[in-house]
Image (tube, grey):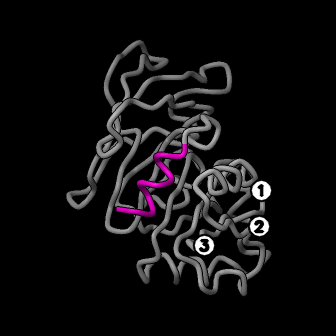
Amino acid sequence: MTRIGVVALQGDFCEHLDMLAMLGWQGVAVKQPGQLEGLDGLILPGGESTTQCLLLEASDLRIPVEAEIHAGLPVLGTCAGLIMLARTVVGGRLDQWSFGALDVSVIRNGFGRQVRSFEADLAVQGLGETMRAVFIRAPAITEVGEKVNTLASVGYRFADGSVRDVPAVVAQGSIVATSFHPEVSRDPRLHELAFRR
């Protein structure tokens, strides 16, 4: 059986575990280093990225999770998980760090605060039909490296009045990341895509 870990220190990890169950996979709530053993993939969930960074360090998970990511373990990062995977984070606290495994630059809350949360139908490469995406205080991807594939983009009117398409789903090697929360849509296709590519 496919075993996918979900970092379960803060954020919406329970919803990710529910999605894995919908796929008939075993979800493992990862709270300590030993729970990383024997996994087929790992999810970095949405939540508050700076808090998750602090908790990863406090639980001695930062170094072993980083090692698994850089060793090629398939990883899905959603919202805050995208921020933690990014090469560059704009708008974070001075003590905020990231794994630097995904060659993108992101702006925390790039789509605006809670009141600017929104939903959109996205055409994601590899999924066939569109999926409903829920953006909640979402990070905005502002730059992508040459090895990063944009699997879906979303058009959005930013606070400065400009309208432009920005990447919403990206992939690089064994990593897939989204600026939205696929786990709240009850549609498990993106989870399946991330771990069956």
Tell me which amino acid carries mark 3: Arg
The magenta span reads 188-197
* Dots 1, 3 in contact, CB < 8 A: no
What residue did someone put label 3 on? 3
* Dots 1, 2 in contact, CB < 8 A: yes
Camera-side residue: 125 or 95? Answer: 125
Horizontal and vertical percent position of residue 136: 62, 32
Asked whether residue 49 is drawn in magenta, I would say no
What residue did someone put label 1 on? 10
Q: Is 149 located above or below residue 116 in the figure? A: below
Camera-side residue: 84 or 134? Answer: 134
Residue appearing at x 61%, y 64% in the figure: 25
What residue did someone put label 2 on? 55
Q: Of label 2 and label 3, which has the lower sequence position?
A: 3
Q: Toward which corner of the image does residue 71 lie, by quadrant?
A: bottom left
Residue appearing at x 68%, y 65% in the figure: 27
Horizontal and vertical percent position of residue 54: 74, 65
Q: CA distance from mark 1 to mark 3?
A: 20 Å
Horizontal and vertical percent position of residue 50: 68, 55
Q: Toward which corner of the image does residue 31 lie, by quadrant?
A: bottom right
